[in-house]
């Protein structure tokens, strides 16, 4: 009975997720942003999918070669990509602005490299305190290493995160097709050319700090989960995954969505003892770290400024999301109201009343549509927030910055690419939902968790403040979903050819029963 219920819930989720992704894409194409042609946003994503399918089917011919040469081709790719990434980021170093500048100034103060500190800022945005502390630690290490500028050490760490995310996408990609090595390269190369990632990588901000942590923690957990299935001990991997998720949560709260996706998978597929065992191993580091960080924050001078400058964190972001298109507006009724009141309790009461009075906007058609478009109608991931001005006007700056020479072309390309990813992910949901075979309890977590995570982050930005940049640290999961959708389409095409030639059906299920060595 439970197996049947799990399968039904999984199919319902796939149907609703596909419907949601399809609706988002149609609504965004109907009214594109920044003067981009709706015709181009209709044609180019479909042309991209067709090109990817063609390349994937052609790639099958070199599958054996890729398997044999993986030992040297993969390291060589990462070495060349690292040099390219450093070249682009170093020659388009953005000048810190707004939140970015405040975080750096605060980190330098804690590291003893600056005399001024804006505690007012951190009293209002106290979710940035732990990233500031992390950044200050990196600056201290850079001092110990006698580096002239701690920026270069942070840039190195950001680049490591990009490479780690790509490697995880590569390993997970091996599970999405019977042509495992070709599927792995496809997913990684799709991710490698997404320029907004490089725009964020050169920034010293929370999005870059948290970029790979969700997918790395999931990959570590999956490795341990599969060891457990083989009868081996997995507590070290379980604790390590929990620690990574705990660190990621303190850098940016949205990282925790992939952990919630893992717990959802376990509830649907495992008995209660296994669920409790995993929950204890994963949540203990997260809860302990959250309590320790909360206690640390109370020791800082920000407490003195809470009544004047602070805002109720959860209520604030919900309230902002209920006005206009859901994006931040300094002149909006809610922002002016909550920031103009003295006393944290009064601010919380104002937020509570405002949210209750405007609850109908959660289902108001005009508000929801405008919020959907503000969140999802562009693929730039707000990387331009960190490249408004740059010390060097390199290629990356000229693409991403509003003042860049290639900005218009870049914006069209990256938005079309984004729609292609959404459409591929929707295809994954549709084809998974209609195929026969393993679903629900029998589905692999490598399939379930990325799709649930993508759904989770999209719901998050629809519930709270609208901000395209909030999607950034789930880009690796989105590429996993798009990769599996593309390969399911390839396998469906193959099925059509086989059926036409022999009249026999083939198995379209994912090759998810891979050995544990395929993971990390």
Image: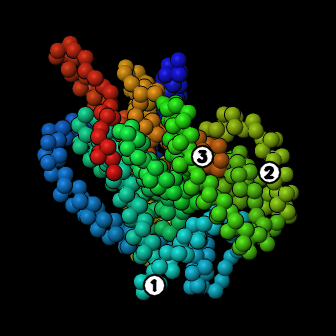
> Which disc number belongs to residue 461?
3
Tally of marks? 3
User: Looking at the image, is mark 1 or mark 3 earlier in the sequence?
Assistant: 1
- Among the two numbered marks 1 and 2 on one chain, the one whose residue lies closer to the N terminus: 1
Tell me, for residue 144, which label it has, or none: 1
On residue 351, the disc is 2
Note whether residue 430 is visible.
no
Q: Residue 389 at what x, y percent from top left?
A: 49, 71
Apparent side of residue 400 relative to residue 103 in the rendered image (left or right): left
Indicate left or right for 331 with 494 as reference.
right
Q: Secondary structure at mark 1?
A: helix
Label 3: state its secondary structure: helix
User: Looking at the picture, does residue 456 appear above or below residue 337?
Assistant: above
Between 166 and 248, the one lying in front of the other is 248
Tell me if residue 225 comes above or below residue 91 in the rendering.
Answer: above
Q: Secondary structure at mark 2?
A: helix
């Amino acid at each position: 009975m439970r197996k049947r219920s799990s399968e039904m819930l999984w199919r319902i989720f796939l149907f609703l997720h596909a419907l949601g992704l399809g609706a988002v894409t149609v609504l965004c194409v109907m009214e594109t942003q920044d003067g981009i042609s709706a015709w181009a946003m209709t044609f180019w994503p479909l042309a991209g999918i067709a090109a990817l399918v063609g390349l994937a089917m052609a790639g099958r011919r070199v599958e054996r070669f890729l398997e044999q040469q993986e030992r040297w081709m993969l390291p060589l790719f990462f070495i060349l990509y690292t040099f390219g990434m450093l070249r682009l980021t170093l020659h388009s170093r953005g000048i810190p602005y707004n939140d970015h500048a405040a975080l750096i100034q605060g980190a330098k103060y804690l590291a003893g490299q600056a005399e001024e500190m804006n505690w007012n800022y951190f009293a209002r945005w106290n979710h940035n305190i732990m990233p500031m502390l992390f950044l200050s630690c990196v600056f201290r290490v850079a001092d110990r290493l006698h580096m002239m500028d701690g920026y270069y050490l942070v840039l190195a760490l950001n680049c490591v995160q990009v490479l780690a995310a790509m490697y995880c996408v590569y390993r997970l990609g091996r599970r999405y097709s019977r042509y495992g090595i070709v599927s792995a390269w496809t997913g990684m190369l799709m991710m490698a050319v997404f320029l907004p990632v490089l725009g964020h990588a050169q920034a010293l901000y929370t999005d870059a700090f948290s970029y790979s942590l969700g997918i790395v923690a999931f990959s570590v957990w999956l490795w341990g989960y599969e060891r457990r299935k083989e009868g081996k001990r997995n507590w070290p991997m379980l604790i390590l995954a929990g620690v990574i998720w705990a660190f990621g949560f303190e850098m940016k709260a949205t990282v925790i969505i992939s952990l919630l996706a893992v717990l959802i998978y376990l509830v649907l597929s495992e008995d209660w003892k296994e669920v409790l065992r995993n929950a204890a191993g994963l949540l203990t580091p997260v809860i302990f770290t959250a309590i320790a960080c909360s206690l640390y924050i109370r020791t800082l001078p920000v407490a003195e400024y809470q009544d004047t400058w602070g805002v109720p964190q959860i209520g604030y972001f919900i309230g902002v999301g209920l006005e206009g298109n859901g994006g931040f507006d300094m002149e909006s009724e809610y922002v002016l109201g909550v920031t103009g009141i003295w006393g944290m309790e009064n601010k919380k009461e104002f937020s509570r009343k405002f949210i209750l009075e405007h609850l109908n906007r959660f289902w108001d058609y005009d508000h929801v549509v405008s919020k959907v478009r503000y969140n999802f109608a562009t693929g730039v991931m707000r990387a331009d927030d960190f490249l408004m001005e740059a010390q060097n006007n390199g290629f990356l700056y000229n693409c991403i910055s509003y003042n860049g020479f290639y900005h218009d072309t870049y914006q069209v390309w990256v938005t079309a690419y984004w729609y292609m990813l959404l459409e591929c992910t929707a295809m994954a949901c549709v084809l998974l939902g209609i195929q026969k075979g393993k679903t629900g309890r029998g589905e692999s977590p490598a399939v379930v968790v990325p799709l649930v995570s993508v759904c989770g982050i999209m719901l998050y930005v629809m519930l709270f403040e609208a901000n395209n940049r909030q999607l950034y640290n789930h880009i690796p999961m989105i590429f996993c979903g798009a990769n599996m959708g593309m390969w399911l389409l390839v396998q469906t095409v193959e099925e059509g050819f086989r059926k036409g030639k022999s009249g026999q059906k083939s198995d379209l299920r994912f090759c998810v029963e891979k050995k544990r060595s395929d993971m990390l």
